Image (cartoon, grey):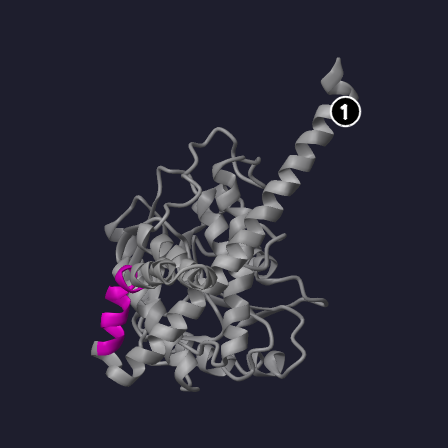
């Protein structure tokens, strides 16, 4: 097994990440750190370990870093782990066992522990609680790929064609849309890692906005106007772009309606029912997550988690709307240019 660690300015967590990799009960054959032009002490920290370090002279993004690591790796099994995650001691052994038990699996992804790698406040606590809940809920066969701590057989990675290096967000989700439908995507709670997540509100919301905007352009728009895939055999049966989670859609639209419907109350008090209906839809759609927050952290954290989830939905709604609008506008312009070309008039 080859472990690939993409890194950019993670001096805070890189040592913990590599220490955990070298403490595995089932050691990796090789560890490759791909440093994406860090400006902190990341390269010096990586040099403390017996790993291979690939250093980019300029920042190219996580897609390019993962692809470079995969190109350099000699193993038949690639395990990608982000440099802000410390794997549990049996994570690699668990990945190997799961892939042996499910030979049709093309992507095996792990889950986050509820305990952060470095506790940094309530925003991080909420983010990890949500990630843990969502990933554990999807244990087994799932529809979406995530590459924070994920194993992929080399032949599958080669077949798909690696990551789209044009993408710096949602690149892991887009990878899954090119995975042939004959392969399963599985999430396993035998592969666990402690994550040092975003811990401030504005960076948290900015991250969700960027990912939603990129996701809409790279994945959602493909449902209505499929574009050629950047790599991979054209003859392979392709997986559907992404299975829509109805609960998430209801929560997203309910949150948006709760805000955009408020001005209606100025026309008539009866129209206050519109934003209230949106708020009710949001609460019902996210009741499982909010109930989990209550059981894990108590009533005070439940209130905080409710506000965070509401803000997350609003941010993602704005990102999806902008990303989808831009993607469809680009496709429309491309179609008009093609229609006006000399070849189309012959």
- The magenta region covers 283-294
The rendered magenta stretch, by its main secondary structure, is classed as: helix
| Residue 71, horizontal then vertical, whole percent | 57, 54
| Residue found at the far front of this picture | 268
Which of 101 and 11 lies nearest the eye of the viewer?
11
Q: Position of residue 94 (x, y in %)?
A: 28, 64
- Residue at 50% in and 81% down: 200
Res. 37 visible in picture = yes
Question: Can you give x and y, in whole percent of width and height, for residue 278 in the image?
Answer: 35, 59
Residue 323 magenta? no
What residue appears at the point 62 percent right and 48 percent down from the top-left corner? 326
Q: Residue furthest top?
A: 346
Q: Is residue 251 left or right of residue 293?
A: right
Residue 313 image position (x, y, % from top left): 43, 63
* Residue at the spot of label 1: 341
Within the image, what quadrant is residue 281 found in?
bottom left
Label 1 residue SS: loop
């Amino acid at each position: 097994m080859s472990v690939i660690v993409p890194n950019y300015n993670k001096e805070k967590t890189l040592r913990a990440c590599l220490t955990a990799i070298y403490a595995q009960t089932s050691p990796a054959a090789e560890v490759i750190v791909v440093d994406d032009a860090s400006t902190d002490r990341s390269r010096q920290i990586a040099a403390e370990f017996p790993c291979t370090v690939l250093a980019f002279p300029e920042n190219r993004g996580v897609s390019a870093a993962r692809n470079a690591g995969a190109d350099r790796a000699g193993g038949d099994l690639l395990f990608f782990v982000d440099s802000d995650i410390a794997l549990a001691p049996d994570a690699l052994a668990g990945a190997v066992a799961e892939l042996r038990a499910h030979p049709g699996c093309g992507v095996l992804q792990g889950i986050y522990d509820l305990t952060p790698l470095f506790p940094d406040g309530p925003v991080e606590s909420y983010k990890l609680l949500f990630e843990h809940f969502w990933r554990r809920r999807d244990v087994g066969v799932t529809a979406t790929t995530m590459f924070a701590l994920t194993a992929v057989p080399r032949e599958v990675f080669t077949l798909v064609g690696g990551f789209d290096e044009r993408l710096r967000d949602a690149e892991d989700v887009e990878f899954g849309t090119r995975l042939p439908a004959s392969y399963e995507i599985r999430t396993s709670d035998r592969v666990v890692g402690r994550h040092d997540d975003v811990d401030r509100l504005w960076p948290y919301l900015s991250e969700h906005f960027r990912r939603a905007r990129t996701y809409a352009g790279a994945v959602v728009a493909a449902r209505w106007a499929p574009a050629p895939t950047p790599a991979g055999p054209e003859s392979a049966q392709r997986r559907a772009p992404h299975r829509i989670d109805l609960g998430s859609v209801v929560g997203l639209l309910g949150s948006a309606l709760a805000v955009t419907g408020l001005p209606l109350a100025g026309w008539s008090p009866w129209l206050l029912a519109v934003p209230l209906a949106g708020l009710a839809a949001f609460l019902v759609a996210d009741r499982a997550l909010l109930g989990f927050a209550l059981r894990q952290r108590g009533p005070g954290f439940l209130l905080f988690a409710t506000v965070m989830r509401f803000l997350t939905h609003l941010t993602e709604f704005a990102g999806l709307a902008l990303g989808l609008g831009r993607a469809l506008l680009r496709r429309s312009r491309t179609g008009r240019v093609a229609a006006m070309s000399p070849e189309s008039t012959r």
